[in-house]
Amino acid sequence: MFAMRLLHTMLRVKDLDESLHFYCDVLGMKLLRRSDYPEGKFTLAFVGYGDESEGAVIELTYNWGKSDYVLGDAFGHVAIGVPDIRATCERLRQAGARIVREPGPMKHGSTVIAFLEDPNGYRIELIEQKPRARV
């Protein structure tokens, strides 16, 4: 069987520097690579928690001169696992993040989640991850 894996999710951003600050400085991701395409008038910046060869990352696409997008209602969110959701939300709030749903159990379930918004209005879901038992 052909092996497939998720490579990245692309988000169009209004202000690349502001978005890089949010994803790198606030959420702790690393800028993995950035490329300008003058003929196409756009810049791509890839951010993530690890190397692209090992896990999925986020592609931030900045179209030069475009300062607004309609988010629509089809896209949901990007999810990030965290060990202590309450402490994470407090740290993110102190760094200037906008928490739009405080930590608590998900509706009709017990998984503890919270939501914040990036500078473009995209939702980021935080999911509290319990330590896995070692076998």
Image: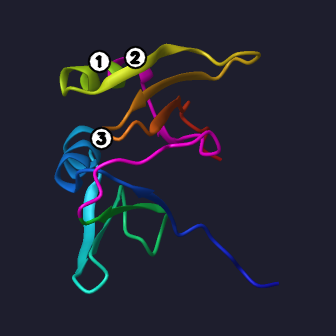
Mark 1 burial class by Cα count in 10 Å: few <14, some 14-19, many 20+: few
Contact, mark 2 vs mark 1 (Cβ under 8 Å): yes
User: Hey, what amino acid is under mark 2?
Assistant: Arg
Residue segment shown in magenta: 65-87
User: Hey, what amino acid is under mark 3?
Assistant: Leu
Q: CA distance from mark 2 to mark 1?
A: 6 Å
Q: Where residue 72 sits in the image (x, y, percent)?
A: 57, 42
What mark, if any, has residue 27 been given in the picture? Answer: 3
Q: Please tell me whether residue 33 belongs to the stretch shown in magenta.
A: no
Identify which residue is drawn at 35% across, 37% down.
118
Q: Which residue is mark 2?
A: 86
Q: Please, what secondary structure does the residue beneath circle 2 have?
A: helix
14 lies left or right of 107: left
Q: CA distance from mark 1 to mark 3?
A: 12 Å
Q: Where residue 64 sits in the image (x, y, percent)?
A: 24, 66
What mark, if any, has residue 28 been given in the picture? Answer: none
11 lies left or right of 21: right
Q: Please, what secondary structure does the residue beneath circle 3 have?
A: loop
The answer to whether 69 is drawn above or below residue 131 in the figure is below
- Nearer-the-camera pick, 67 or 125: 67
Magenta span main SS: loop
Identify which residue is drawn at 43% across, 19% down.
100
Mark 2 burial class by Cα count in 10 Å: few <14, some 14-19, many 20+: some
Q: Which residue is mark 1?
A: 90
Q: Please, what secondary structure does the residue beneath circle 1 have?
A: helix
